[in-house]
Image (cartoon, helix red, strand yellow):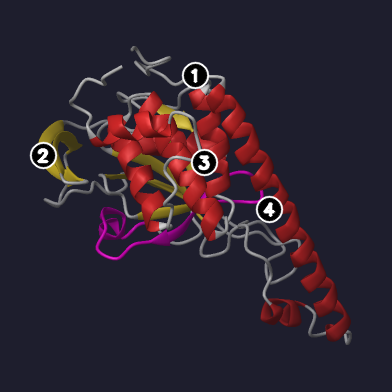
Amino acid sequence: MALAHQITNQPLLSFPPCLPRTNGSNLRTATTQFLGHSCCLKLRDTARSCVVVCASSSAQAEPKSGGGDGDGGQEPYEEYEVEILKPYGLKFAKGRDGGTYIEAIFPGSSAEQTGKFTVGDKVIATSAVFGEEIWPAAGYGQTMYCIRQRVGPLYMKMQKKFGKWDGVAELSDKEVIRAERNTGNVSTKLREIQMQNYQKKMEQKIQREDDLRMGLKLYKDGKYEEALEKFESVLGSKPEIDEASVASYNVACCYSKLDRIQAGLSALEEAMKAGYEDFKLLLPSAIEANRRLLNPYRQPPW
């Protein structure tokens, strides 16, 4: 039975117009490994013979006046570009502004080899799913959709945040005390911030539950791209371990329906690492979806 929908060129998610790449380069061919499968990729020329092509340019603007630690100052603004291969070795998180930020860089990964990424950097643009087009990073779910499904080297345009970013983490007690050390009312302020952090956590939990519920509805309606955006949003919002395992498994099922085998296998692996075990309960077509993931070269029996 044919899939309800299969991606051929550009996903149905609403993306802004494409961005130009800052420079061009010749192509060469290399081979890499992903989830045990060998694939042939085209890489751009680089001064180093490694699997990563580092940034070709960067832009930096001077910080605005009013520096110091006051509220009026702003951090320096710097951009850089980089290309990496799967497995990328990056963990992303959803910021308070809905953007996509680097939460962790895995040792020995393609991302670490560039020497460019730092925790907290923001994704500004990425490669399209196919070809040489560059798409601006919109919402977190849409950006992760592009990153997961990318065929070939992944181009990323990043904004360096110098370790300070608009992330989902709450202020620590130490940060609160430091910020309020001159007010003479640290204890009261600390309790206030702790209560705000608790309320924020509860709001995020409710939002994740809503996203999971809406994602399931969209999945059952056959709107797999829209469902992916909801499930990816859950994964980027500091989910609890059970929420992460469920959302990762849902992502795997969506990619299976879209016949995106490698992206689905990656999400399925994340679900198993997070402890997901009940592969029959979550979605009506879970068994069929994962049979297609685990046996991508065999025709389904239905």
Judge by depth and name the residue closer to the eye, 271 or 174: 271
Of the residues under marks 1 and 3, which one precedes in the sequence?
1
Distance from Cα at disc 1 to Cα at disc 3: 16 Å
Can you identify the residue that label 3 sits on?
232
Amino acid type of the residue that numbered disc 4 sits on in the rendered structure: Lys
Give the percent coordinates (x, y) of residue 138.
56, 34
| Mark 2 touches mark 3? (CB < 8 Å) | no
* Three-letter code, disc 1: Leu
- In the image, what residue occupies the spot 33% across and 33% down? 150
**Quadrant into which the N terminus falls:** top left
Q: As drawn, is 20 to the left or to the right of 40?
A: right
In-image side of 204 versus 222 (left or right): right
Residue 288 coordinates in the image, percent (x, y): 36, 29
Q: Which mark is residue 12?
A: 1
Q: Position of residue 298 (x, y in %)?
A: 19, 24
Q: Are marks 1 and 2 in contact (CB under 8 Å)?
A: no
Mark 4 or 3: the one toward you? 4
C-beta proximity under 8 Å, tags 4 and 3 = no
Badge 1, how many Cα within 10 Å: few under 14, some, many 20+? few
**Residue 286 position within the rendered picture, expressed as x and y whole percent measured from the top left:** 42, 34
Inspect the image, locate mark 3, and give the three-letter code of the amino acid beneath it: Glu
